[in-house]
Image (spheres, rainbow, N blue to C red):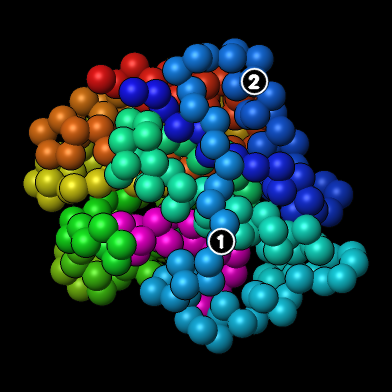
Amino acid sequence: MKTGLITSDTYQNHNTGDGHPEKIDRVTAVIDNFKKIDNKELLWKKPAKFDQSFLINTHSTDYINKVSKSFPENGLAFLDGDTVVSPGSKEATKDAVGSIITAIDGVQQKEFKNAFCVVRPPGHHAEKDKAMGFCIYNNVAVGANYLIDRYKYSKVAIIDFDVHHGNGTQDIFYNNKKVLYISTHQFPFYPGSGNENEKGMYNNIFNIPLPAGTTSEEYLNAYEFVLKKLKEFKPEFILLSAGFDAHKDDPLAQFQLESKDFYTLTKRTLELSKLFCNGKVVSILEGGYDLLALQESTQKHVEALIEFN
Ligand SMILES: [Zn+2]
């Protein structure tokens, strides 16, 4: 089976303003690279039509209404200091959510074996009631709730290897024993959360804070704890909050990972998944702000997804 690559053009109309790091070119760089490589093992697909019901277990009704009304008719509007929306953000946010739904359905229906969603805005900083850190809806959290509601899974793991802590995902699942959330991140750092004593009501949150300057070797050693936790939890499905801003060239953070490290960590996760969910993995783009590093790293990540059999 092939690997799904879920994307649409609507991200191009999510304008965050001049000089904003979470810019249109990020996704364009990734998409152009995959078009150029033209790997026949990739099955390109557009996101499903968005349904508001996808959001209801992840975000509060007040918040959903607030976001719906926030999209300006022209110019830009701010949901927080660095979370910007423009008229086109309405469709882009819907497609970002729709992409993870399409990816999950595709894996469940054996249309493809695993998938990578190339979308923006990202999601992991968005809390139940709050937009934050370039994130509006928490795409990966919507995916986890969809797996639980639609497919009746009771053990879903979210691994977040973005260099920032996914405070939003942690917030949404803090009291939910069906979801194991594991994050590796630079600490202390934005957004401030992610201390190892934040464990969730059911010990279902596992934070691995690492200092600025963390090298590939140190990171991959720490990732062994991620794999150990996964092994204990035995998830039925794995979602990846795939940020690539832990790369050494990333302008927003201070880890020292190389592009190939994203192959290694993906490969190790998939191999381990044979023990409990046999490669049922859906990955979605979070951060990553150096365009060349982002192209290379996503390519490595997807190579590992394609290789899995
Ligand atoms: Zn990040």
Q: Tell me the residue that label 1 is attached to.
A: 50
Residue 246 in the figure: left or right of residue 20? left
Task: Single out the residue that lies furthest toward the bottom.
Answer: 62
Residue 190: percent from left, percent from top: 53, 56
Q: Are marks 2 and 1 in contact (CB under 8 Å)?
A: no
Q: Secondary structure at mark 1?
A: loop
Residue 40: percent from left, percent from top: 50, 14
Q: Tell me the residue that label 2 is attached to.
A: 35
Question: Which residue corresponds to the image point at 76% horizontal and 45% vertical from the top-left?
Answer: 12
Residue 215 showing in the rendered view: no
Q: Secondary structure at mark 2?
A: helix
Above or below 307: residue 112: below
Question: Which residue corresponds to the image point at 37% horizontal and 47% vertical from the top-left?
Answer: 104
Q: Amino acid at mark 2?
A: Lys
Which region shows up in magenta? 127-147
Residue 62: percent from left, percent from top: 55, 86
Residue 289 in the figure: left or right of residue 86? left
